Image: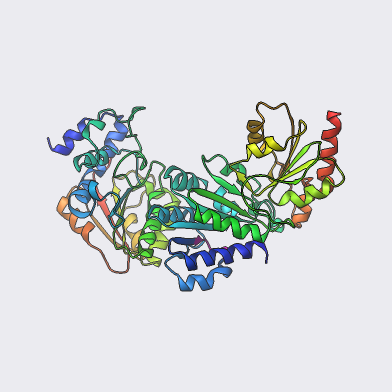
Amino acid sequence: MSEISRLMSLMTGDEKHSLAATSTLDVIRVLYERVLDVSPDGAGDARRDRFFLSKGHGPMAYYAVLADRGFFPESWLAEWGSFESPLGFHPDRNLVPGVEISSGSLGHGLPLAVGSALGLRAQGITSRVVVLVGDAELDEGSNHEALELAPALALDALTVVVVDNGSSSYAVPGRIEQRFAVQGWHAVTVDGRDHDALEKALSHRPIGQPNVVVADVESK
Amino acid sequence: MNPRTQFAQTAADLVEHDLSVALVYAEISGQFFGEVEARHPDRVINVGIREQLLVNVGAGLALTGLRPIVHTFGSFLVERAFEQVKLGFGHQDVGGVLVGAGGSFDIASAGRTHQVPGDVALMDTLPGVHIHAPSTSTEVDAIVRSAVARDGLHYVRVVGQTNTESYPSGGFHVVRRGSGATVVALGPMLDDVLAATAGLDVTVLYANTVRPFDARGLRAALTSPEVVLVEPWLAGTSAHVVADALSVVPHRLLSLGVGRHELRRYGTPTDHVAAHGLDPAGIRRSLDGFLAAAA
C-alpha cells in the first residue's frame, strides 16, 4: 500500500465521497509532488503557486496529499468530519493549513481563480493558479463566465484541470476540450491516471493564454 | 455632482493613488471608468455582463491581498450573485467593498428588475458585514474612502435620493432633540423625516452607517417609549436590531420603509417614495396614527 493510500485509509466516509476522492487522486499527487511550487514553509509567501480545489466534495485525496506533504499532522485524518475536526467533507481555508479556498458549492473555484490570477499579475507576481474542477461541475453556468474572460485577458498564469469521470448528465463526447478551445484556451486531454502525461501537460505554460488539461479517468 | 458620479470619481482616485486597490465592474458605470482603466488596466477590470464572475473576481483579487471595489447595480450585485458574496467574501473570510447603485427605485421607470429594496435585509444575513447608506456626495466620498482603508466586507448603497446636510459616518447623530418619540432616519430618509416631523416635539436621529447598528446611541437618545424607524429599503429591515438594542427597555416600535408588495408601476423615484408612504405627508400620517394609539 502506498503512503497516500495508507493516509486515505485513515479516513472513513460515505461511499459517494470515497469514490469522488479517488478520481482526483493522481492529479492532486502530480501537482503537489512534481508541478507546483508549494510547501508548508512557503504557505505565507505571496510568490507561492496556488492550487484551488473547486470540486470540494470528496476531499480525502486532497487531505491525504496535504498530510503527506506536511501541511498538517496525519493524526487529523482519523477524526475528519467530526465536530472537533478542522477537516470537513468540504475543505475550509480558514481551518486547514495549505487549503487556498473553501469550497463545496460548485462553480466558484474557477471564477475565484480568475480573480487571483489577475491579482497576482497586478502585483507583478508570476506564480501559477491551478484550479481543479469536475466534469459535472462545468454544468454550472458561473464557470462559463470565467471561461470566456480568462483568455480575453490573456491570463497565462491560470491552468484549469478538469477531472472527467463522466459525471455530467447530458454530456456530449469531446465537449469539454472543445468548449475551452473555442474560447481561446490551450487545451489538451490526457489519461488522468498517467503521472508522466499529467506532469507534462500540467507543467506546460503557454505564453499569453490560459490552459486546460482534461484528465480522463474511469467513469463513476 | 450626483452620488453615483462621485463614487466613480472617488474610486478612480483610490485606484490612482493606492497600488493595493482594484476596481471590478460589469459594464455598468463603464462610462465613468475609461480614463482610469486605460491608465491601470491591471487593476481596473470590466468583466462584461457577468455578475457571478464580477463578485468572485473581486474575492479572488482579495485572496492575493488586494482591496477590491466591486460595482454594478445593487440588484445584480447582491441579489443575482448573493451566493458569490456569501461564499467568495464571507466564507473565504476576505474583505472588499461592494458598491451597489440604484437602490430601491432610482431606476423606477425600468421596473422591478432594476429595483432592489431587499438588498440591506439580504446583506444583513452575513456576519460582520458593514452596511452604509451615504446620502450626499460628500458622504459617498468619505464612506467609500473609509471602507477601502479599513478591513472586512462593506456594502455601500449609492442612490440618487439625497439629504441636504452631510454627516460623518459611524453611529447616530442627534439632528433634533425633543421630549417625545424618537424618530430614526436611516440614509437618505433624513430630509423627509425632518419635514414630516416639523413642529413636533420629537427626537430625530440619523445614521449613514446602518450595520453595525449603533445600539448605544439609540438607547442614549430615548426619552419616551415610542420609536419610529424610517428606512428607504424594505420596511422592518432594521426592526430586529432596534429590538435587540432595546431588549431591556419598554418600547413600542413603528417600522416604516418600502412595502413588500410589488407595485408594478414605473414613473419616477418620487412617485415610488410617495406610493410607499415615505414622503413627508406619508410619514406624518403614519406617525400621527402611531402616536395617537399611545395616547
Q: Is residue B25 magenta?
A: yes
Q: Is B49 drawn above or below residue B169 in the view shown?
A: below
Quarter of the image that includes the N terminus of chain B: bottom right
In the shown orientation, is residue A98 left or right of residue B112?
A: left
> How many numbered tags mark residues here?
0
x, y (%) of residue A13? 29, 29
In the shown orientation, is residue A20 left or right of residue B281?
A: left
Question: What residue do we see at 73% from left, 29% from top?
Answer: B251
x, y (%) of residue B179? 81, 37
Q: Which residue is at the front of the view, A7 or B150? A: B150
Q: Residue furthest left?
A: A1
Q: Is B248 drawn above or below residue A203 in the view shown?
A: above
Question: What residue do we see at 66% from left, 35% from top?
Answer: B242
Question: What residue do we see at 64% from left, 49% from top?
Answer: B116
Quarter of the image that includes the C terminus of chain B: top right
> Which range is magenta?
B24-29
Figure coloring: rainbow
Query: Visible in this render: residue A183?
Result: no
x, y (%) of residue B44? 47, 65
Query: Visible in this render: residue A29?
Result: yes
In the shown orientation, is residue B277 left or right of residue B260?
A: right
Q: In which quarter of the image is residue A36?
A: bottom left
Name the chief secondary structure element in magenta: loop
x, y (%) of residue A30? 19, 50
Q: Is residue A83 magenta?
A: no
Q: Which residue is at the front of the view, B216 or B51? A: B216
